[in-house]
Image: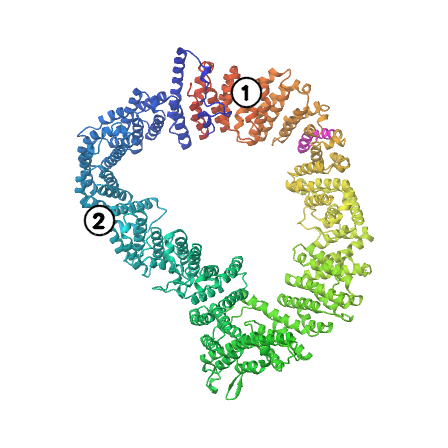
Amino acid sequence: MLARGSIKGGSAEGSSTQRPGKPSDQHQEGSREQRCGDRMSGSHTQAFSLALIDAAFDKDEGVRQEIAQALRVLGARHPQLVLTACHDYLSKHSKLVQVHRVIVLHSMEAIAKDSLDRLEQPLARKLISLASDEMTRSKDVQAEWQAAASQLLVALGCRFINEVMEDVLQKFQPGVLPHLYIVHTLGNLSTANVYGMVPFLTAILGTMLPMLAMAKQDSMKSVFTIALAHFSESILEYLANLDKAPDPTVRKDAFSAEIFSSYDILFNGWLQHKDPKLRSSVVEAVGQMSHLMPHDKLEEQLPRLIPGILNLYRKHSDHLHITQSLCHVLDAAVEMGSRVLETQIDNLLNTLHPQICATLDYNNHTAVKNHNEVLRCFTVLACAYTDRLVAFLLQKLEVHNEKVRIGTLTLLKHLVNSTATQLDSKRLLLLTGMKLTIQDNNNYKVRRMLAQVISTMAHHDYLELEGGEAMVEFIIKQCALPCHPENPKPRTYDPEEVTEEGLRDMCDNILNLLTTTVKRMQEVLWPFLLEFVMPVQYLNALAPVCRSLAYLGTKRQQAGSTEALLDYAGRDLPTPHALLTRLLVLSSFPYRGRGRGVPALRLLQAVSALIHPQLGRVWDDELPPLIQHLEEHSEETLAQRQWEDKLLLLLSRSLETVTACDEGWSCQLSEEMSRHLHHYNSFPQEKGFLYKCAGVALRQIPNSDVVRRQLMELLQSVRHSEILEREGVAVCVGFCATTHLDDTLSKLQDFGKSDILKKSPSLFHILKDKSDVELEKAKSTVILCYGYLTLHAPEDQILARVEKDVVKHVLAHFNTKVLGIKVETKDMTIKLSLMKTLTLIARAIHASSSRRNIPYTFSQKGELLHYMQDVIRAEPADALRTPIRQHAITTCTHLLKLAPPLGEVDTFELIKTCMNSVFGLPAPAVDRSKDENGINLREREVLYEDTLAALQELLKQILYQDLSPDQLDNVYKHVEGWIMSPRECERERAVLTTSSLLAFYLDKLQVRTVVSFHSLGSLLGRLVPRCMDPAGTVRRSALHGLHSLLSIQQRHAGFALDHRDEAVERLRTLPDTLDQPDSKQQFHSCSQIGQVIAQCIPQTQLQPLLLLLFEGLADPHPSCSSAASVVINTLVRIRGSSLGDQVPVLLSVLHLRLESIVAEPVKSSVLQTVSLLAAQNLPAVISCLLLHPLPYDRAVGEMWGSLAMEGTVCRQALEVLTERLDRQQPYEERRESLLRSATVQLATVQPLAMTCAVGALLSRPESGEAVSLLQPLLFSSLLLRVGSSIGVRLPKDPTGQGPVRITTTLDVCSCSVEALRGMVVRSGNEDILRIMADEDGWGLMKKQDTHHQGVTLLARATAQHGATHLHSVVERLEPALTAPYPGQRVTVAAFFAELLNHRVTCDLLLTDGLVSALLRCLVDTSRLVRMLSIRGLGNVATGAAGKVHKYSTRLLSAMMAGMDEKDDVDDSVTLESMSGLSKLLAQLRGNNVEPILINIALRIRPFFEKDEDRVRSAAFTVFGNLSRFGDGESKADFLEQVHSSMVSLLLHLNDTSHQVVKSCKFALRLIGPLMGSANVSAMFQKHLLEEAHLHYGEFINDLAKHIINDFPEKINFYIMGNVSFFKSTRAEIRGNAAMFTGFLLGNLSQAELQSVSLEHVCGAIIMLLRDAVPAVRIKAAEALSLLHEL
């Protein structure tokens, strides 16, 4: 509420904490006057109270609340009077509606509570009597009314307990059933005033007991029951605080007999009632009463009491009161050491336990409270009956039911936490029960609860006992739950759902917490957790397990533990070799299993001494970098092969360290690795890595027998259908061959002859069955082993044996003979193995022969290359399903490196075969083919990329064998056709390959003699358009190719290797610009490309280049044709090939060409011709272009724009167009139709065409120079054109005026505005553009009703930021004020009016002319022109303040006349007049205004109460400005006007219009100093800041005090002024007036009040309580609350 702060004594100035009224030290009246004042105050307070009470039953809730609050405020100051008024009102109006009585009673209760200490006993008795009578008047229950009266009695009873009890007990007589609310009141009194009521309770209980038997109605029984519960509660509180009690001798025994007797009736009689509410209240009371019953009686009743309470659970859905009561009973029974309670244990447990097991709705607060109360019951029972409770819980844990188990576990967790002492001896038993439970196949919800219980037990030292390890194992099993990130299970709608992920993460956290926070758990977990490292079923838990083990191991190291070996007694712990093997394999794929790599490596470092004492130093150096490497990467960024190499290197260095002192250790490790292989059958990648580790171990073993045996075991353990296992064992064989070549070859040959690689020769077996497939896989393994053997074997041994011992066996395994017939395999696996093996063999041969410089001729090279080409041709041309192409091409690449060299024909065929097979493939996203492997899109993309890379390597190898322009041309011929392909994927592959080949050629080129690079032109011609290809990859590759081509040209021209041409090197900086979306930047880059080519290309290559670039203009991709056109223009400009010969091309042909061209760079090259033509034939070109249809199409507009490319042409064109535009008639007036006399304005065609032409010219940035020279001419002409276009329509029959055709989509005014806007844009004045854009000035200018606003905005911007040419503009515009076109007069008047608002007009000596021009316009026929003229004349005060005195008489007369404007339907002229008057008053001298000061004030005041917000605001502003002249000779008269207007000003301070509020603040700040009150003025200056928030109520309250002090003679005037506003049509003003009146009256002294017609004023305020608007009634009530001192 607005004045709530004032009611509480707040002050806007913060200097007073008193309530409204004068400070007490200023009122020292005698006792007689004080008594007189009290009588006066009493009469008015009673009147206000009665008025408020009478209006309390308002239909609006907000009003009712405010009236209640007002009564409470009055009551706080005059509790006696207000409560008496309420008492009398209720007493006199016995038939008052019940709701009204309730409101009054609630107000009385609030006043009584606030003023209880100040109430006199006689009044209290009257109120008690009234409340008692109200409460008991009706024998029927009327709850709201009687409850309100009861609450009043309770409030009074907090002090007047004896008086209340005296009255109430009279109606509480023995043998007579009392009124229901008498009992209700007694119960509430007992809890409200414990120390006052308990002494009465013995007598009350004695009287009440016989009544219990008399109660027949349910409501009566219920209220008795509730009262007994309150009595018991208050007695218990009294006894618990005897040190504070008035009678500390009170004992429980004093009430026991009566309480038990009451209990007997309640429990044995009423508890069996059908009414659930009664039963609920009875059971609640019984719970409270149980603490007061005699122990023997309670013991006697327990066998009946507890079952009775428990039975209620079945009858009630709400269990909270039952459980609370039961908890009280159990607490009382346990406290007294009951023996009978034990007989009820089973019943209690069987009843309470299901409630714990029930699903709990956590959104139901009652259910949650009941759940907690049930847990409290179990806590109470656990203190006395631990054995029984534990046995019960263990029994329930055996039940195979989800809810039962979850509930039991919940209870167990609670008891472990809350009754740790009582359960201490039962820990082992509970662990045993838990052990049996976790062995069952529980669902996730039960497992979650089990994990929580185990965590709780761990924190209470349970897990140190026998069975604790089983609990830890359970946690680890949950950590090992599988992860399915690719296929998550769908979520159910069960809010209690427990997912695998949620359970697993929770158990991870539990294990981590047990390891790091529960100190005594460390002995339990170490080394027990090591048992879980090896079993496969715990693989997914190894990340948390290894993390915990690493933590524990590190702690033991830090503690100085010196144990080198683990104690294996009775434990299934891994051996050191097994542990090393397991952790290495886990680390090979470090981000699997939730990031197990780092924990595994940390564990290795922590247990290095346990694995081998010599490893500590090595691993301390090696492991931290590996761990850091993993932490810096992710699964996506880690290079898997390099990571495996790092681990293999770690193993190799570790074995070297250990083998130096223990040769047998490596053998044991190798055997352990072999034994572990079968564990990874489900994990082929890990198994493949383990094979590699075994190879590293075999490499370190010096014993050949062991190596041969182990190698054969490894070969026999491979599952040949798994590619990763084949790869792994092959690498293993290769590692082994490093130090055991002969043994390895021997074992491979033996394995090749084994049964696994044989099959029976039969023609019937030509068709493969399943066993044949396995045979092919096995052969693949052997073939691959030979490849890696060759790669890793010692170079000095392998070269002489490669064809005899390797290739021979490889081909023998690849080709199968059936009955002597050679049958070629179709199995893809064996083909891939053969290709990879041949690649490895070729690599080994090439590396060995290169390093040893010994040439080696591979005799089978040609045959193998032909076979590879056959394989490539056999692949489908429309799909890439397998990596066979890639591997075949890679094999060819490596075979090409070997001698003998390949012939020209074979080379041509090889290129053709490979290129057609790769380039012709569809894009990966288009290739939707399905294959047996089901590869996804990303895998297919990788396959495509790898295949293309393989092709590029092949072509590089072919080119490398003969680095010459001819060889480059030979290869390029194969690629050229693909570069122009319409398919993006084919272009991309071709250009990528070309760029890659050119870069390779440049890198390897060594020119010894200067030769001609004859293919340069054709290569450049194809690559240049591709620099703007839609595909980014093509663009970048083409540019790289250009750089390489030009660099190659320089090399062939004889430049040194280190020569760097600056022009060519610029091409390196262009790729980024080509990728930018800005087309201008891209075309600039193309121009740079053209410049570089022009500088570098030989003259002989220019013609071929241009011919191909001309073809590029027809490229289907517009960007490519644009690139070609830009480079063509650049070449022509630089190399001297001029376009002058093509000038005769006609404009119509150019127009057609422009319509068909889409690419902007191509358009630019064509438009250049138009510009050249216009430079020679400007009038003809203009006349021709003006004949095109309106609006101009895109092509014609661009042709007009091209005239701006050259500055002189542009200037001449604009001069011609504006001269014609000024001469011609802008529109014609015609009758709208034959039937209507109204005329319409129709645009003339030629000016409209010229306007569009100017707009098109000015749309080009190049026209800026011409605009700067013609700015005054263009600005004034286009502004007048805009003015003459407002409301003008298109001509109905334009063909009759000339050959130009006009479409109906053209808007005349928009054309003119856009032309004007284009002129401002080209002038470069960003400030004007910003202002116009921010306020939508151009849009305003186009609309007839807002046109003058747009012109005003343009004038303001021009005066502020474009005054350079303003003098010339004004001269050109002034004649238009007398023009016959109203639109032009409005435009110029608006422009001139705003110019006068700026000082620049005075600086340019324009003021006199502008003022004279606008004074002449005051008699214009257009009201809008008159309004704008008044605005301009008012602006003189701002722009030319020094000349206001010169024109003061005429200006003031204009403003006064404007306020009397009769034809002012929208108050616009009035507003402008008052606004202008305010401005003028701020500048005029006193002698100009003082003679008419009072006249102005009187003329202004009627506008204060106008409905229009802007008018009120302007009037207040003018009144404030008049204050400048109020201190002169007319001060006394003006001060009277101030006081007459003050009430209105202050009331409108809280106006609904923010603008009006600001104006009132402004006026009051200016008026304040004139009023002669320093305090009032100070308040105005401090609180009425323009944007500051005003606390209106507090401000008016404080202001009223100062008005009373400083203007005592005006008090009645102000009060009556406010009263006059009580009938205002504005609701907020009526409310403000009521508040202001309240503050004035509330702060007056009794003497000052004598001069006020209080009856009239207060009556008026009271009448406002009946106002139609609720807000006004609220303010009236609040105002009455302020009058507590009357």
Most foreground residue, 120 or 1642: 120
Disc marking residue 1368: none
Q: Is residue 1424 magenta?
A: yes
Figure check: 772 above or below 1417 = below
Q: Which residues are magenta?
A: 1410-1432
- The residue tagged 1 is 1575
Q: Residue 1010: x percent and y percent?
A: 78, 70
Could you tell me the amino acid type at mark 2? Ile
Q: Quadrant where the C terminus lies?
A: top left
Question: Quick one: 1468 or 313, which is closer to the camera?
Answer: 313
Q: Tell me how many marks there are.
A: 2
Tell me if I can see residue 214 in this picture: no
Residue that numbered label 2 is attached to = 345
Please tell me how crowded label 1 is: few (under 14), some (14-19), or many (20+) other residues with Cα within 10 Å. Answer: some
Is residue 231 at all visible to an observer of this figure? Answer: yes
The amino acid sitting under disc 1 is: Asn
Drawn side of residue 145 relative to residue 694, left or right: left
